[in-house]
Amino acid sequence: MHLIRLNKVTKTHEGAGGTFHALREIDLQVEPREFVAIIGKSGSGKSTLLNMLGGIDSPTSGEIWIGDTPVHTLDQDALAKWRGRNVGFVFQFFQLLPTLTILENVMLPMDFSNAIPARERIARALGLLEQVGIREQADKLPALLSGGQQQRAAIARALANDPALLLADEPTGNLDSRTAEAILLLFKGLAASGKTIVMVTHERDITPWVSSVVKLADGRVVNGSETP
């Protein structure tokens, strides 16, 4: 069974210049445990597609299935509940709350969704920080960590509620090449351990890390998907 299935997903915006097509009849299937890179020039529709997968944005037409959930049919309240339990997000600029410790940042999704019993949250957060290699930073504020460490903390936070799907929007875009490679290796390991990861990226040589590449141009998938 596909974890992700998109059927003719279109997203349009109406403006003074007329109708703008951000996505045009996208068909896409992603299997469980795949690590998929979405690539394309600025304005090609990459982030719009990622937002569709995470239920942050809704299609103008078409169907989006994540597992057995028809995401395109959910209202905003149902989407928020579904997202909290099923999707983890990783962003280019980390988006850690600056006044909370790293441990508290990782625990935050657990507090919001109540998917993890309260008595288990500290131990789970520490375990996730161990998994991403920064347990010793748990009691520090984000500003005291390097960019790579902050991104690792953000990945731990995305894993907080044990989601099946991780969505990453330019997660290495603010990192030096060596640190970016370490983050890609971490993602590859997460996919091998059972997570499905879809990542928007500008990384030029992404094929050694991912299981497939989807190219977008002008809101369309071009040449289908490629397997490295």
Image: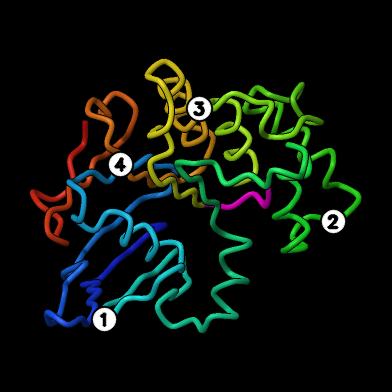
**Is residue 169 toward the left or the right of residue 23 in the image?**
right
Single out the mark in the foreground, 1 or 2.
1
Position above or below: 144 against 98: above
Q: Position of residue 87 (x, y in %)?
A: 54, 57
Q: Kindly identify the residue that appears in the image at 51 percent across and 43 percent down.
A: 195
Q: Are marks 4 and 3 in contact (CB under 8 Å)?
A: no
Q: Kindly identify the residue that appears in the image at 44 percent across and 64 percent down.
A: 66
Q: Earlier in the sequence, mark 1 or mark 2?
A: 1
In magenta, the rendered stretch is 160-164
- Give the SS element for disc 1: strand
Q: Give the amino acid at mark 2.
A: Pro
- Give the SS element for disc 2: loop
| Residue where numbered disc 3 is placed | 186
Identify the image quadrant of the N terminus: bottom left
Q: Position of residue 145 (x, y in %)?
A: 65, 26
Q: Are marks 3 and 1 in contact (CB under 8 Å)?
A: no
| Residue where numbered disc 4 is placed | 37
| Residue where numbered disc 1 is placed | 61
Name of the residue lying farthest toward the left: 223
Q: Give the amino acid at mark 3.
A: Leu
Q: Earlier in the sequence, mark 3 or mark 2?
A: 2
